[in-house]
Amino acid sequence: MNLTLFVWRQKGPGAQGGLEEYQAKDISPDMSFLEMLDVVNEDLIKDGKNPIAFDHDCREGICGMCSQVVNGVPHGPRERTTICQLHMRHFRDGDALYIEPWRARAFPVIKDLIVDRTSLDRIIQSGGYMSVHTGGVPDANAVLIPKHDADTAMDAAECIGCGACVAACPNGSAMLFAAAKVAHLAQLPQGRAEAAQRVCVMTEAMLKEGFGNCSNHYECQAVCPKGIKVKFIAKLNREFLKAELRSCGTPEAGTPSRD
């Protein structure tokens, strides 16, 4: 396969960026998208040019590092597929591919296709965990959890924090990401003790990081490589309303400002 690539190149956060054209030649249909970029980079290095900078780690669809927009779609055209698991057989010989980084105010470009996604980490650090001391590890059947609750929690826990939902949302919202984390923990008895405080501080963190609001475009669900459903956003809203009635108005709960 031979393809024409239009790749976003940007030297640094404050530099002017733009699309540059490259040729990807003799690409095997069995290569992954990242392996195709590796081949292009090898040719660039041989020619004494700077290779294309892009994020990657596991290349197994687990870590969510491979954040790229292909022809306007985060993670490319295949549903429930990360860019590292997208294979070139899903494209045709002679195709033109436009490859860009995530586009969101909360994700500033570091270089080329690499963006700073630590804003998602800070949302988790604000309250996306359980700090309740439960003593020794109980037996597996000591804490009884209905199967429906366990299954729902696992569905939410599939979120890998890649940020595709933010990149696809016209508002740059992180609601699906935060909702998956809130719903995952709120669904389990171990997470209920801190549920009110958690949803308050995590939504406050989203506001501070510059993410937009959810306005129900459903683009987040459409591009999520793990198929996280927007029903979890409804769960987050319910948790927030319950918390607001109980404790969000107290300083300890970290309530969003009403001023």
Image (cartoon, rainbow, N blue to C red):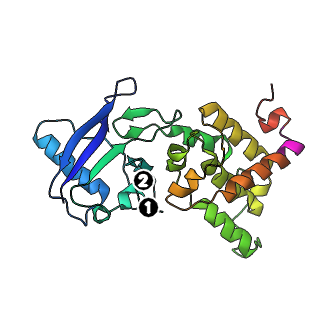
Amino acid of disc 1? Thr
- Crowd class of label 1 (few under 14; some 14 to 19; many from 20; radius 10 Å): some
Q: Is residue 59 visible?
A: no
- Residue 14 horizontal side relative to residue 9, left or right: right
- Residue 224 horizontal side relative to residue 152, left or right: left
Q: Are marks 1 and 2 in contact (CB under 8 Å)?
A: yes
Could you say which quadrant of the image residue 183 lies in?
bottom right
Residue denoted by label 2:
75
Segment colored magenta: 243-248
Instruction: Residue at 46%, 38% (x, y): give it.
Output: 103
Where residue 173 sits in the image (x, y, percent)? 60, 42
Instruction: Residue at 28%, 61% (x, y): give it.
Output: 88
The C terminus is located in which quarter?
top right
Where residue 201 sits in the image (x, y, percent)? 72, 39
Q: Is residue 146 visible?
A: yes
Where residue 148 sits in the image (x, y, percent)? 72, 73
- Residue 143 horizontal side relative to residue 22, left or right: right
Instruction: Residue at 21%, 60% (x, y): give it.
Output: 93
**The disc label shown at residue 81, or none:** 1
The N terminus is located in which quarter?
bottom left
Amino acid of disc 2? His
- Crowd class of label 2 (few under 14; some 14 to 19; many from 20; radius 10 Å): many
**The disc label shown at residue 27, or none:** none
How far apart, in angstroms, are the residues tagged by discs 1 and 2? 7 Å
Q: Earlier in the sequence, mark 1 or mark 2?
A: 2
Q: Secondary structure at mark 2?
A: loop
Residue 139 to residue 57: above or below: below
Where residue 102 sits in the image (x, y, percent)? 44, 41
10 falls in the magenta region: no
Could you say which quadrant of the image residue 112 lies in?
top left
Q: Secondary structure at mark 1?
A: loop
Residue 28 to residue 193: above or below: below
